[in-house]
Amino acid sequence: MSNQLHLQRFQEQLAESISSNTFLKVSLGNYQGNDKELKNVYVRKVKIKRADMLSFTYRNKTRDIVKNFDIPVGITMVTHFISNDFKACTLFTTEKEVILEHGKNHVISMRERMLNGDGKTAPALAHNKEKKRLIQPAGKPYLQELKITDAEGNVFKNAQDKYKQINQYVEILSSLIKELPENSIKKVADMGSGKGYLTFALYDYLHQVLKLDTKVTGVEFRDDLVSLCNGIAKSSAFTGLDFVPGTIQDYQVDAIDLLIALHACDTATDDAIFKGIKANASLIVVAPCCHKQIRREMDKAKVKNEVSVLTKYGIFMERQAEMVTDAMRALILEYYGYKTKVFEFISDAHTPKNVLVVGVKSAKLSGKALEVKQAEIKQKLAETKAYFGIGHHHLERLLKLDQ
């Protein structure tokens, strides 16, 4: 059989497998083209905006590139690839494998291997595989009462972003909790809990997934939200969860294992970190916003230095103040024996990128080693303040580190 007939037969089998829903994938290998980065191409069937398409993954040495094409165009492209630069191609179906190869003297051969009844099931056509989320929507009364899902556990269309946001936060906290000794999370405080989306989800995760007997408290100054959340906690039989009225600054706590403060405005984030340090919390997680205190200090001083070309512009000054504020917060956490992490995440589609500042309690230094490290940190804080013309940092003042 000639090369052209082999290619035609292969193309017919590819098209027939797609139309009969027995198609699994196509693998193109032994690349002999001019692109030094390209190694393989993999093709699978996907559904995008209710239309069946072929998704091509171009596997390069350093990254993958995905392109999607209509079915007829995709079939033609596969045939073109095997006719030219790819010297091996395998069609995988639920019934058989069809292998096309270039041999000596550019002669193409084709062979088939039947699966004899032990074939695979055709894959789902979702463009992106549905992610397995830690908080599943079904059977969660609190999600229904918070208007995230309906009575059957289906996530409302207008609540998809909020549902993803909840899961993102829980996934982040899950990875951080794993760094702590097992079963060490006994008491949690969520400062500025608002409507309690995260508070409920975290309680659900700690109790239903990790099987911990953890007491969780949400602190919120708006009385109506406190009443609402306590009602939902009661109807959800979350006996270890409660919400209390008050500000972060006024909340009194003597012992806590995990402190959370998301989007606490300006120095309220400092108040939350202060409470966590004083309570010897094992894990402190804050997402700061509205860095006004340091911005005012920098505006007032107007220090001339190497970054003055940036800080003369309002938007850059704002960003610089944010970075300086959070960098100093991380240093202060380190002073008190925390291993710190600062990373960026996106909470949902309607808010900008946020920075998460994390402190994980680590083994304490002692004696001379502790004194040396703390002296170094205090020196860094002093140098930072002098460089940017900062009179004081609110958290530093709360902890009396500036004395």
Image: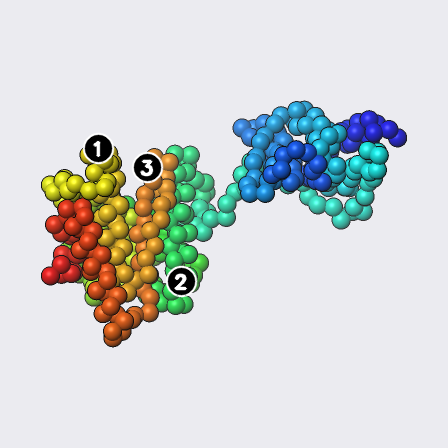
- The Cα–Cα distance between marks 3 and 1, rounded to whole angstroms, is 23 Å
Q: Nearer the viewer, residue 395 or 59?
A: 59
Work out whether mark 3 precedes mark 1 in sequence or the reverse, and give the earlier one: 1
Q: How is the image coloured?
A: rainbow
Which badge, 3 or 2, is on the more N-terminal residue?
A: 2
The dot on residue 313 is 1
Q: Amino acid at mark 1?
A: Tyr
The quarter holding residue 308 reads: top left
- Work out whether mark 2 precedes mark 1 in sequence or the reverse, and give the earlier one: 2
For residue 351, the mark is 3
- Seen at 24% across and 68% down, the residue is 372
Labels 2, 1: front one: 1
- Up the image or down, 221 lies above or below 99; here it is below
Q: Is residue 21 above or below residue 216?
A: above
Residue at x-position 16% and y-position 41%:
304
Residue 7 at x, y = what percent? 79, 29
* Residue at the limit of the structure toward the bottom, as seen here: 367
